[in-house]
Amino acid sequence: MLCIEKCPNNRAVTIFVRGGNKLIIDEAKRAIHDALCVIRNLVKDDRIVYGGGAAETACSLAVSAEADKIPGLEQYAFRAFADALECIPIALAENSGLGAIDALTELKAMQIETKNSRLGIDCLGTGTNDMKEQKVIETLMSKKEQISLATQVVRMILKIDDVRVPEDEQGGY
């Protein structure tokens, strides 16, 4: 433990990182940076959402319900967006060794039945899907940024109207 006393700038903080090799040190630095970013987001906006795919599932259900009210082709864009939101809980289930489709189907049914948007994927196998009980949270600011960035990327891809492929030496594509 290193203790520095009587520092003239008592608002400054230095974090010393030690590790067995450069890879461990780099990973620790990345984890510290991520933690500081979460704290920064909470200082800017202290609202949170529950993790474990709970927020994405709740949004997916809301978007799907809204799609039911839209006549015509626009409803397919809404449905595609709702399907895209389900990728997060599916990935969490797969990475946890759960059956992705079964886990998502159960989660959606539980959220609809209980009207509890805190329910997410039980990645740790604790026996509860309530992310409040498991203390799995994310900052609202980061969740909004994730969804906004993903939407912007899709819009940029959809704006591409032509793709040029260079000809090979035989004159074909």
Image (spheres, rainbow, N blue to C red):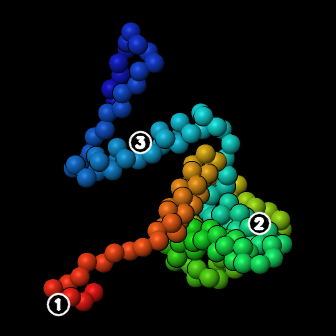
Question: What is the distance, in whole Å, between disc 1 and disc 3 at their CAs?
Answer: 52 Å
- Seen in the picture, residue 4 relative to 62 is either above or below; the reply is above
**Residue 23 percent across, percent down from the top left:** 25, 52
Q: What residue type is labelled 3?
A: His
Could one spot residue 79 in this view of the protein?
A: no
Q: Quick one: label 2 or label 3, which is nearer the N terminus?
A: 3
Please state which of the two labelled residues, at mark 1 or mark 3, is closer to the viewer.
1
Question: What is the distance, in whole Å, between disc 2 and disc 1 at their CAs?
Answer: 53 Å
60 or 107: nearer the viewer? 60
**What secondary structure is marked by label 3?**
helix
**Residue 139 percent across, percent down from the top left:** 61, 47
Q: Quick one: label 1 or label 3, which is nearer the N terminus?
A: 3
Question: What is the distance, in whole Å, between disc 2 and disc 3 at their CAs?
Answer: 34 Å
2 or 137: nearer the viewer? 137
- Per the image, the residue denoted by label 1 is 170
Please state which of the two labelled residues, at mark 2 or mark 3, is closer to the viewer.
2
Q: In this view, does 82 lie to the left or right of 9?
A: right
Q: Which amino acid does label 1 sit on?
A: Gln
- Per the image, the residue denoted by label 2 is 62
- Per the image, the residue denoted by label 3 is 33
Q: Which amino acid does label 2 sit on?
A: Ala
Please state which of the two labelled residues, at mark 2 or mark 1, is closer to the viewer.
1
**What secondary structure is marked by label 2?**
helix
Could one spot residue 115 in this view of the protein?
A: yes
Q: In this view, does 49 lie to the left or right of 11?
A: right
| Residue lying at 33% horizontally and 26% vertically, measured from the top left | 2
Quadrant (top left/top right/bottom left/bottom right) for the N terminus: top left
13 or 61: nearer the viewer? 61
* Name of the residue lying farthest toward the left: 169
